[in-house]
Amino acid sequence: MRTQVAIIGAGPAGLLLGQLLYKAGIDNIILEQRSADYVLGRIRAGVLEQVTVDLLEQAGAATRMHAEGLPHDGIELLFGGKRHRIDLHALTGGKRVMVYGQTEVTRDLMEVREAEGLTTIYEAANVQPLDFEGSKPRVRYEKNGQVHELECDFIAGCDGFHGICRASAPADKLRTFEKVYPFGWLGLLSDTPPVSPELIYAQTERGFALCSQRSATRSRYYLQVPLTQKVEDWSDEAFWDELRLRLDPEARAQLVTGPSLEKSIAPLRSFVTEPMRFGRMFLAGDAAHIVPPTGAKGLNLAASDVGYLSRALVQYYKERSEAGIDGYSEQCLRRIWKAERFSWWMTSLMHRFPEAGSFDAKVQEAELDYIVNSRAGSTSLAENYVGLPLV
Ligand code: RFL
Ligand code: PHB
């Protein structure tokens, strides 16, 4: 079997790349180790930047998002028991974000891919990128106990943080930068109306909480929890009780609770790999970097990486120029490091750190007070939250 671009991983990065390349007339095959249902069962991100919305449009996968997604013009910061609105729209000259779940983005991309008759090989085992430092890369994989090889011009490693592509890159050519946080997020999804029209990011003495949503009838809430805790330690009742304690009186009164549809704990981490290209293999999305979810940037970075990569590959095939693929890593990393900085900053601002003393707590309070009361402070948050432009 042969294709132009072999894509490893059918998460949002791989599926979006496949669609952008297809639209530009570039042939691709996706290899995914899990089943489609498994991929759709992962409840993750919920906030899309305009850049991501634009790329989904370009990919021809934006119809349902425009019909069902919720454009949001602001977010609220809750601290000292009071909520303060950050007017994203006014502070950024008219930009906004779209609240639409990663599950839905993935489903829409899977559906357009299937409708176009493009190949995705699910449940591909022992996927191995080979010979990417030469001119004829290959990907070996097993399906139903049989070994297959896919020949290609390029390999796109869109296989997430635990994938095989970064692990296959030559160790002496790879640098990693990492910060692990001493807490995780316990998330709960429920068929209950959101507590408030906009997202609430809450900084409290008991720890961080986030009130997010998927629709007018489905909510997503998160609580900062110590890494020592397990999801089994948290009954639904315990979750709702703790969330109430981290809200302001009005939100507490408004909160509608119900049984959880999903509950899970995600550790928080900042991580970057440099470079993102090894010969004819590129890394994109979580395969190359991780951000803590506080800035809502993980899925958006995955989208902007593949936006750059598809542009670079179009340049290669249509204009016979290698300038795009040569500049890919540097171009991505410039945007990634800014999102890493913002996500780290939002995490530091909003969470309770076990090692922090009373001085740190006062500085955190002062910073929050500065942000909501200074136009420069709010603008900086807003500009990063809605997403920096693709350059
Ligand atoms: P994904 O979504 O992890 O997809 C990678 C795909 O590659 C497959 N794969 C392989 N396939 C073949 N062979 C192999 N050897 C393979 N190894 C892996 C996997 O099965 C998978 O289908 O990466 P991608 O596409 O880069 O997308 C990135 C986003 O998923 C991610 O950045 C965000 O979801 C991060 N994230 C969040 N981001 C936010 O902005 N807001 C959030 O609330 C938020 N919550 C989360 C998250 C990530 C989580 N993880 C990774 C545990 C919550 C969780 C729990
Ligand atoms: C979510 O809805 O899952 C979500 C929203 C905003 C974040 C993180 C997660 O910052």
Image (cartoon, helix red, strand yellow):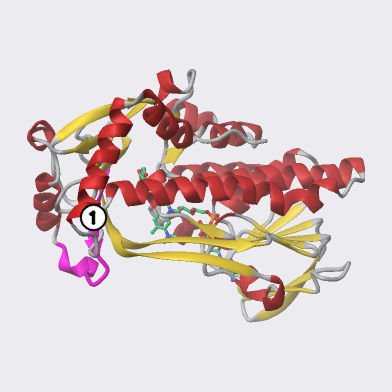
Looking at the image, which residue is at 13% across and 61% down? 235
- Return the x and y of residue 194 as percentages of the image width and height: 23, 35
Instruction: Tell me the kind of residue under disc 1.
Output: Arg
Which part of the image, by quadrant, shows the N terminus?
Answer: bottom right
Question: In the orientation shown, which residue stands out farthest toward the right?
Answer: 320
| Residue at x 51%, y 35% (from the top left corner) | 387
Helix, strand or loop status at disc 1 = loop
> Residue 58 lies in magenta, yes or no?
no
Is 303 positioned to the left or the right of 319 in the image?
left
Quadrant for ligand 2 reads top left
| Left or right for 232, reference 35 | left
Relative depth, front residue between 111 and 45: 45
Label 1 sits on residue = 352
Left-right relation of 327 to 70? right
Q: Give the range drawn in magenta.
A: 219-234
Can residue 27 be spotted in the picture?
yes
Position of residue 302 measured from the top left corner of the image (x, y, whole percent): 57, 49
Left or right, 384 with respect to 272, comes to left
- Name the residue: 55% across, 37% down: 52
Q: Position of residue 141 (x, y in %)?
A: 68, 74
Where is 324 relative to 72, above or below? below
Residue at image point 80% right, 46% down: 324
To which quarter of the image does residue 137 belong? bottom right
**Toward the viewer: 305 or 85?**
85
- Most foreground residue, 24 or 124: 24
